[in-house]
Amino acid sequence: MVSRCIVCARVVKLAGWGLLLGTVLALVVAAVRTFTFAVGEDLRLSAWEKRDVLPGTFSPQEKAEFLRSFKEAIRIPTVSTSETDLNISALEEFNDFLQKAFPVVFSSSLVQHEIVSDYSHLFKVSGSDPTLQPYMIISHIDVVPAPSDGWDAPPFSAQEISGFIYGRGTLDNKQSLMGSLQALEYLLKRGYKPHRTFYLGFGHDEEVTGPNGAKNIAALLKSRGVKLSFILDEGMAVLDGIIKGIQGPAAIIGVSEKGIMTIKLTVTMKPGHSSTPPRETTIGILSIAVSRLERNPLPSKFGLGPERAMFEHLASHFDFPVNFVMSNLWLFSPFLTWILEKEPSTNALIRTTTAVTMFNAGIKNNIISPYAEAVVNFRIHNAQTTDEVLQIVSDTIADDRVKVEVISAGEPLPISSYNATSFGYQIIKKTAQEIFPQVVVAPGVCVGSSDSKHFVEVCDEIFRFVPTWFKIEDLSRFHGLNERISVKNYEEAVKFYFQLFQNCDISKLPEPHAGGHEL
């Protein structure tokens, strides 16, 4: 008995030493990874292909000119309310405006222009080397409705206040559309001839899912056998102070976007009088179903999509001990998941979200309603499918009296590459660092929906980024009140595309540093 106890004691002692040794080793590995990420993020690709570059400097006259054009674009109320309710007269006005604002683009022998579906635009800018695979920049013409109450300036006035231009479309998405065309206009004026062919595509109904604009542009390209190297669309931006704990701003390049599904829940029964109510009503049954969905969020999928890479790329820019945690997600993922779940903006990164957006029932105050319905919107994580989410919804509600009907559904988009050999990602990253030298660049996932979804058959590599600054207070301006962009930031947007077009003219990416850790 004594010998057995001694053996047990020795086993316990050895186990204790083993646990201690394992902990020390884990911490050593974690420290090494923290250092590696910090060093790796600062490594740059070796020398890029040498080429002549036109400087992105504009005269005072040119700056005044492109600000006038941008303001004029904002003043045209190209509002999309629904697929069947578009401001057609404004879209026609915008067609005419583009030709007047960019005469060199429309008259250049290098540029082919065509109108698609009456109001969308497709430009092809021919490069000198047909062996280089073309790329594409897409933006959209339409904007969401803008109630006039609550604005510091009328929403379609393009009024300038304290260095900011106010108006619907300044952030979503005319700054990208006008910035890219303005950059092309000035490049062509300076005698620019691209090596690589590229396209500009501007849909007119993105805010109502793009069924006639971007969808038909993509179909046209497919019919012509066009296969694109990469596409750059809206979706992410330069975030300043939005990611808590990070030192300085971060330019997040969306490498995917979440899926979207909208379902309708309905309960029906015979009507009755409120004086003799049944044990359960349609409203009560549906309320319980909705409550179950809200109280039981779909499981976290952190680490199974691009959201993990975003935190790893940003790791060295957090203060200690957060940088230690971010650099070692193999060890701290459960802890980080717990933190991210606490804020709606970060919770949306790690799971499929559930949002009850409509609830309708009742016909009179003394009648038991024979019908109740609710609409629920899901933004689907890359690691899930619409069928999986639908099954979880049915299992969670667990009530056959609640009918579940899918109104619309779209799967999460494929994840584009973001390593050292990803041409599109590295070009966008390089350009962002040239225009915004103070930012760190990282991949991320776009939680909203864009026109990108229509182009998956003509391009495998789709990225989402606009050269626009977003601070905490700007998040509510997006589709909200007082949408605005600074004069300085719009000038940066023009410079970004001016530089991007030229950066894309290289034939291939340089090799990464030998032995370097390219994030």
Image (cartoon, rainbow, N blue to C red):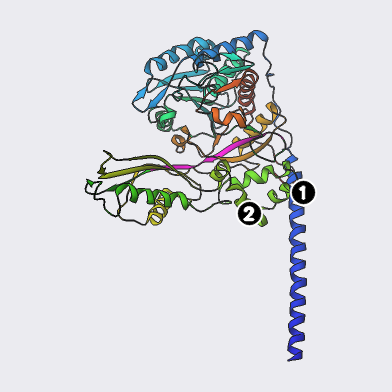
State whether residue 147 appears in this view: yes
Percent coordinates x, y for residue 238 in the rendering: 63, 31
Which circle's residue, 1 or 2, is located before the other in the chain? 1
Which residue ends up furthest to the bottom in the rendered image? 1
Give the camera-side residue of 175 and 195: 175
Percent coordinates x, y for residue 142 in the rendering: 45, 23
Based on the picture, tell me whether residue 258 belongs to the magenta stretch.
yes
Quadrant of the frame with the C terminus: top right
Q: What SS does tag 2 mark?
A: helix
Percent coordinates x, y for residue 114 in the rendering: 43, 19
Q: Residue at 77%, 76% (x, y): give it.
A: 13
Position of 283 with respect to 338 (left or right) is left
Dominant secondary-structure state across the stretch colored magenta: strand
> How many numbered discs, if any?
2
Viewer-side label of 1, 2? 2
Percent coordinates x, y for residue 403 in the rendering: 31, 50
Based on the picture, tell me whether residue 349 belongs to the magenta stretch.
no
Callout 1–callout 2 Cβ contact below 8 Å: no
Which label belongs to residue 333?
2
Q: Residue at 64%, 16% (x, y): give it.
A: 163
Residue type pointed to by label 1:
Phe
Which label belongs to residue 209?
none
Gap between marks 1 and 2 measured at Cα:
18 Å
State whether residue 130 appears in this view: no
Quadrant of the frame with the N terminus: bottom right
Residue type pointed to by label 2:
Ser
Magenta region: 248-262
Q: What SS does tag 1 mark?
A: helix
Which label belongs to residue 35?
1
Residue 180 occupies quadrant: top right
